Image (spheres, helix red, strand yellow):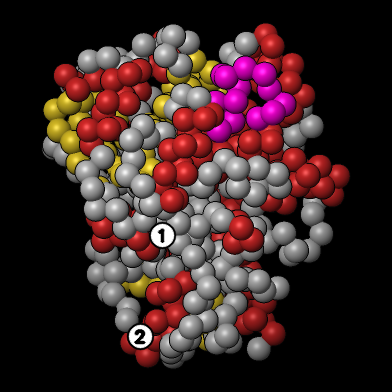
Amino acid sequence: MPSMLDAVVVGAGPNGLTAAVELARRGFAVEVFEAKETVGGGSRTEELTLPGFRHDPCSAVHPLGIGSPAFDAMPLARHGLAWLQPELALAHPFPDGSAAVLTRSVGESAMSLGAQDAGAYRRTVAPYVGHWDTLAEDFLRTPWDGLPRDPYRWTRFGLDALPPATLLARRFRGAKARGLIAGLAAHAIAPTSGIATSGIALLFALAAHERGWPVPRGGSQAISDALASYLREQGGTIRTGTEVRRLDELPPARAYIFDTSPTALARIAGLGSAYRGYRYGASCFKIDYALSGPVPWTAEEARRAGTVHIGPTAGEIDSALHAAVDGRDPSVPFLITAQPSVVDPSRAPEGRHVFWVYGHVPAGWEGDATDVIERQLERFAPGFRDLVLARATAGPPQLAARNANYVGGDIASGAFAGLQTVIRPKLARVPYATAHPAVFLCSSATPPGPGVHGMSGHHAAKAVWRRLRAA
C-alpha cells in the first residue's frame, strides 16, 4: 500500500462505490470506509420479516439504474448484476378496475389513457423516444458542466421539464393521464405544483419506454455488491463497520469524498455552517410485507406490473404530498408500491411474495400510518390484509436510524423546493467541491439528485481526478 492514498471515500452507498470505482479504474489508490457491517446505503436487501423473504429496505425498482451512463460503462453483469423486467413497468389503477400503464411500448401506454389523451401522450414523449443515451448524459449531471451532447433535445427537454407537473397535466383531458403524470412527478416527494416536477414525470416515463423499470435479481443489494466486487477487482479496498466521526480518524489521502448528507460532511470535516441553508424535505412511512399470495388487485394490469401507484387522481396525489410537506398527518396517502417477486421468485419462498409500499408523511413524524396505508390498499386490492403473514414498518425515525443520510427520514437527502430543486447542495460551479480543497461531496444531495444511478459519484470522481491531476 502506498504511504498516502490518493482518495478515501466515506460511505459505501451506490454513489460512494461509484466514485471509488471511477478513481480506482484510473489507477488511483482508493479506500472506502462504511459505518455499517455491509455495503449498500440505499441499495440493500435484508430479511426484514420472515426467513426466506428478501426485502429492499430502501430502493427497490431501478429505472435510472439500468439507464445510468455510469453503470453502463462498468462490467456489472460480470460481477453478478442481472436486471429482470416485469411485463408492465408501471400500473396506475382506478376504482372502476381499469388502469393506466407504462410499458416499453409508447402506443400501448398511450392507449391505456383513453382515446381522448392517447395522441397528446404520444406527442409529449415523441421528441425524446430513441434518445435516452444522450438525454441521460445531459440531464443526469450539473446543468452548467460543459456543453450538452444533444443541444437541441437538451433545450427542448429543459423547456418541458422546468414547469410544474400541474402544467404538464393540462395537456391531457382525462383523469387517467393526469393521475399518471401526478404519480410520476410525486417521486420527487414534493407537491406537483413545484418547479421542475414535469421533468421528474417525463424522465420516469421515458425511462419506462427506453430501458424499463427493472428489479435486480436477488434484490437491490445486487447493485451494491456488483459495484463493490468491481472496485476490489480494480485494487480498491473497503472497510466496513467503521464509523467516521472526524477527518483526522481517516488515513492520509490527497482527497476525501463523502457519500453522506451535507450536514454530516460539515460536522466530520469541520466545515462549520457551510451547508446551513440546505433544507431537508418530507419523509415517508414504509412497510415491507411477507404475503401468502400475490396482491389481489382489482385491475388486472396491476397484477403484471413491477410498480403500482395508488392515487388515484391528480388532486388526491397532490393533497397527500401537500399534507406531508405542510406537516399534517396522512389521511388518504398516495402510495408507491413494488412487487419484486412477480418477476423474481427467488425473493420469497415458493408461492409466497414480498411487497414494498410507502406513503408520504412529514419529516420526523412519529405516528403509525399502517392503518391508513392498508385502507388505501384495500380500495384497490380487496382482501389484501388477509394475505399478510408479517410486516416490517419504518417511519421517519427508523428510516433516519437505518441510513444517516436520510435526515428526518428524507429519503431524497434534500427537499425538492424552490431553487434547491435545480441547485443543490448550494450554488457552485463545481457542486461536489467544498471549502476544504481536499474534501468533496458525492451523495444524492449533489446533482443529479436521488436515485440509485451512481451519477453523483461519477461526477464527483471527475472533479476529484481533475484536482489530483492538476496537483
Residue kind at label 1, given as amino acid type: Gly
Instruction: Of the two numbered discs 1 and 2 on the same chain, state the one appearing first in sequence.
Output: 1
Q: CA distance from mark 1 to mark 2?
A: 19 Å
Which of the pair 316/67 is nearer the observer? 316
Could you say where residue 271 lies in the image, as x and y percent from the top left?
48, 86
Q: Residue 104: name its quadrant.
A: top right
Q: Looking at the image, do the residues carrying marks 1 and 2 touch, with CB atoms under 8 Å apart?
A: no
Q: For marks 1 and 2, give the one nearer the viewer.
A: 2
> In the rendered view, would you say 460 is above or below 385?
below
> In the rendered view, would you say 265 is above or below 405?
below
Could you say where residue 277 lies in the image, as x and y percent from the top left?
53, 73
Tell me the SS state at disc 2.
loop
Which of the pair 341/32 is nearer the observer? 341
Q: Which residue is mark 1?
A: 13
The N terminus sits in image quarter: bottom left
Write down the region rendered in magenta.
169-182
In the rendered image, the residue lying farthest to the right is 152
Q: Residue 106: name its quadrant.
A: top right
Could you say where residue 455 lies in the image, as x and y percent from the top left?
57, 56
Residue 261, magenta (yes or no)? no
Residue 175, magenta (yes or no)? yes
Could you say where residue 184 lies in the image, as x and y percent from the top left?
54, 35
Mark carried by residue 246: 2
Mark carried by residue 117: none
Tell me the SS state at disc 1.
loop
> In the rendered view, would you say 426 is above or below 347?
below
Q: Residue at x 60, y 77 (%)?
A: 433
Q: Residue at x 75, y 40 (%)?
A: 160
Q: Residue at x 26, y 28 (%)?
A: 374
Secondary structure mostly taken by the magenta-highlighted segment of the chain? helix
